[in-house]
């Protein structure tokens, strides 16, 4: 089959018009200062030169005939400074009216959003696949949102937003009030599923401006314009409650920081840039909400279910490790280290590259792999052992020096004391590369202390997990590990569960204000209210 034909797998049929999304500002379509185009993820695997050539041609001339090529699936308008400011002004104008809408009515937005995700799940998945997310990974992203917006989670959030008590002749209220205007900057690796968190920010009563990443804007603009905006209209939200722009990141962030109309900036990105951005926000009186890098640890104890622990370890390779919440390091009890590595090696054999729409594919292309080989080379030079992987590979899994995929790669490091002298242990790698650290044999009590100390000393703090059967080991781990926004025990490291946070963490993951991130709570602030009747002020102060 001709890969550029209208019926080739992974390409939308061209009997429908090219997807075209203007900016969304104050409830209206607004023209931008040009267009950015999206080419299908499959095209990057079939004919990378044509794919790149199409993008370059369209960047030079957005109205060229290249826009009609079957590889081109959609376009989004690009905002300039004037449109960015207009979106902020629209949000500021809408914020008081939306904040005055009763909480229970705003909460319905979350329930309706979940219903729409279920109803439009095929389109949701297709949009992710077009942007090179493997189908299996896209289903994981969808499952995460269905848990984030589950009845149980929304009910828990509702209780945190408003609670009432009675005391004597008083009605006491502890409630959270919206911060106002929240600007939202999703990441390039998962823009649409991250932008969906803006719905929680809206539910808190904030008006929102979202910047769709300029290099990969299509799915984000689709979600906000075609799914979220109609739900806000249904809820009677003022125009401008949600605004969606696609723009240059520095230009947009600089204008948000400088604007007196923006209250919070929700920033998802790398740690170094994010921590600098945090300081800039605070200096300008903004609340920074950071979702930065992760460098998660899995601890495998001697009595663990090794098969299931190995499954959790291989979650490191989902999307070729280009996801912040996958495991990045394993600490394993020396008594089961060989068995765990053997099981991991077996499971890695079934993880393969392929076209993103193939149901069994987990690996994504890795465009800039120089850092991968530098990290691996340093580890091997320092004495680590290569367990499996370590090469580029072609679409069909054949090892190659020019392939756009990387093999799932596991290295063994013996000795815990110097483990963080290895860059691939100390830093987030963002590759299909995971070190398994095996400490020197010691008494269990000493080993457990060293494992917990190691996890707590991690400068990152997104997720940490444990595999063990001993209730004492589990209790010690849960009771003493303070690092991270989420702890998982005998469970999928990347799986989502109701009520518990999906994002957030400490240290280099969340900045100075880092913690488990519930966007409804992080973009609102606590307020106490006392409504009294028939109470003397003097008696209230001094008693009877």
Image (cartoon, rainbow, N blue to C red):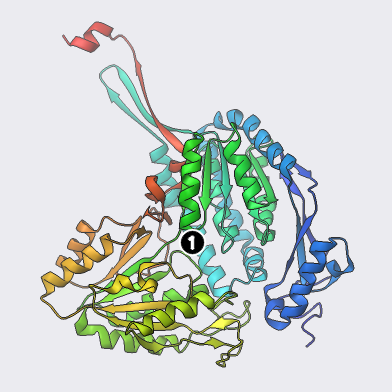
The residue under label 1 is 144
Foreground pick, 312 / 110 = 312
Q: Is residue 228 visible?
A: no
Q: Residue at x 72, y 77 (%)?
A: 43
Q: Secondary structure at mark 1?
A: helix
Horizontal arrangement in the rendering, residue 170 relative to residue 477 (left or right): right
Residue located 10% across and 76% down the image:
443
Q: Quadrant of the N terminus?
A: bottom right
Residue 12 seen = yes
Q: Quadrant of residue 467?
A: bottom left
Relative image position of residue 474 (x, y in whole percent): 20, 65
Residue 437 position, x and y percent, is 29, 77
Would residue 53 appear left or right of 89 to someone viewing this image?
A: right
Q: Position of residue 27 (x, y in %)?
A: 72, 40
Q: Is residue 39 above or below residue 401?
A: above
Return the residue nearer the eye: 34 or 16.
34
The quarter of the displayed image where residue 361 is located = bottom right
- Residue plotted at (37% across, 49% down): 515
Q: Residues within 10 Å of mark 1 (few under 14, many from 20)?
A: some
């Amino acid at each position: 089959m001709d890969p550029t034909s209208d019926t080739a797998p992974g390409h939308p049929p061209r009997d429908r018009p090219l997807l075209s999304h203007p900016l969304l500002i104050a409830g209206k379509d607004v023209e931008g200062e040009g267009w950015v185009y999206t080419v299908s993820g499959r095209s990057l695997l079939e004919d990378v030169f044509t794919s790149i050539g199409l993008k370059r041609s369209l960047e030079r001339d957005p109205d060229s005939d290249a826009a009609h090529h079957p590889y081109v699936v959609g376009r989004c308008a690009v905002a300039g400074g004037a449109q960015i400011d207009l979106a902020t002004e629209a949000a500021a104008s809408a914020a008081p009216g939306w904040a005055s809408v009763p909480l229970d009515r705003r909460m319905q937005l979350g329930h309706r959003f979940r219903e729409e995700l279920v109803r439009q799940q095929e389109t949701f998945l297709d949009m992710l696949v077009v942007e090179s997310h493997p189908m299996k990974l896209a289903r994981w992203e969808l499952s995460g949102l269905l848990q984030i917006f589950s009845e149980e989670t929304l009910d828990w959030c509702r209780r945190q937003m408003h609670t009432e008590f009675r005391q004597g002749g008083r009605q006491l209220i502890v409630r959270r009030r919206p911060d106002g205007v929240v600007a939202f900057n999703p990441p390039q690796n998962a823009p649409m599923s991250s932008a969906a968190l803006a719905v929680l920010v809206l539910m808190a009563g904030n008006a929102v401006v979202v910047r769709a990443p300029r290099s990969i804007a299509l799915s984000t603009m689709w979600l906000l314009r075609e799914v979220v905006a109609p739900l806000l209209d249904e809820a009677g939200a003022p125009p401008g409650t949600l605004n969606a722009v696609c723009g240059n990141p520095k230009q947009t962030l600089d204008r948000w920081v400088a604007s007196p109309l923006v209250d919070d900036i929700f920033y998802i990105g790398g740690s170094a840039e994010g921590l600098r951005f945090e300081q800039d926000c605070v200096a300008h009186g903004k609340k920074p909400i950071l979702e930065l890098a992760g460098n998660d640890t899995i601890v495998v104890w001697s009595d663990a279910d090794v098969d299931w622990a190995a499954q959790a370890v291989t979650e490191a390779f989902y999307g070729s490790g280009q996801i912040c919440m996958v495991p990045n390091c394993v600490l394993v009890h020396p008594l089961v280290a060989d068995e765990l590595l053997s099981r991991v090696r077996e499971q890695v054999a079934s993880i393969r590259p392929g076209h993103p729409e193939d149901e069994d594919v987990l690996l994504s292309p890795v465009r800039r792999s120089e850092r991968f080989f530098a990290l691996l080379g340093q580890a091997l030079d320092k004495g680590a052992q290569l367990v499996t992987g370590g090469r580029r590979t072609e679409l069909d899994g054949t090892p190659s020096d020019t392939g756009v995929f990387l093999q799932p790669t596991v290295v063994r490091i013996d000795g815990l004391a110097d483990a963080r002298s290895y860059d691939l242990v100390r830093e987030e790698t963002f590759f299909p590369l995971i070190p398994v650290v095996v400490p020197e044999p010691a008494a269990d009590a000493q080993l457990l202390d060293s494992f917990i100390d190691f996890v707590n000393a991690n400068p990152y703090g997104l997720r940490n997990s444990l595999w063990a059967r001993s209730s004492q080991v589990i209790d010690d781990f849960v009771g003493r590990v303070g690092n991270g926004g989420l702890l998982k025990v005998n469970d999928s490291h990347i799986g989502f569960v109701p009520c518990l946070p999906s994002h957030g963490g400490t240290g280099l993951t969340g900045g100075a204000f880092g913690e488990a991130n519930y966007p409804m709570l992080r973009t609102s602030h606590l307020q106490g209210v006392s409504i009294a009747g028939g109470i003397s002020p003097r008696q209230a102060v001094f008693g009877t």
